[in-house]
Amino acid sequence: MDDAARLLQLVINGAAGGCIYGVIALGFVLIYKATEMINFAQGDLMMLGGFVALSLIANLGLNYWVGAVLAIAIMAVFGFLFFVTIIVYAVVEARQTQPPILPTARLRGNLFCGLVFILVSWIVFSILQQCLSVSGCR
């Protein structure tokens, strides 16, 4: 590969990575402006979506676009279920408690959810990778 083609590929890869970081940053700003609290679990959800897309495309052998759309759909369902089961329950519980829940408690809950996402994805995807690399594990 000559230098011009390599430079063009690096520029395109850098722009794509920068666009991904920009979308994540816009999500942080949108959530912060709406709730006045930083959502640390958002980056972990992006990581989980990346692992889901990687598993669908690389391990299951799906087409890139089919895997990407399917990963978006899976993460949308996961996000909705997470919202309904955890967030709505926490808001209803917070309205019923006296005195109201402090922002530091919400921050600890947010960090805990992020930690759970990291640990679960680490366990699930490391086991999945080991099973797919060893024959007879299925």
Image: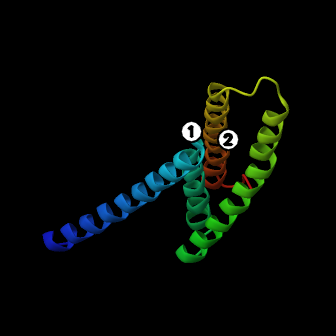
Which image quadrant: the N terminus? Answer: bottom left
Q: Is residue 82 left or right of residue 54?
A: right
Give me the residue at 60% from left, 50% from top.
45
Q: Mark 1 points at which residue?
A: 37
The image shows residue 121, relative to residue 136, as above or below, that is above
Give me the residue at 77% from left, 23% from top.
99
Which residue occupies the foreground of this view, 86 or 122?
Answer: 86
Residue at the outermost right position: 96
Q: Name the residue under label 2.
A: 120
Which image quadrant: the C terminus? Answer: bottom right
Amino acid residing under circle 1: Met
Which residue occupies the foreground of this view, 81 or 91?
Answer: 91
Residue 83 drawn at (x, y percent): 74, 51
Residue at the outermost top position: 99
Q: Nearer the viewer, mark 1 or mark 2?
A: 1
Asked where in the image residue 8 lies, by quadrant, the reply is: bottom left
Give me the residue at 59% from left, 56% from top.
49
Badge 1 density bin: few <14, some 14–19, many ≥20, Cα 10 Å: some
Amino acid residing under circle 2: Val
Residue 95 drawn at (x, y percent): 80, 36
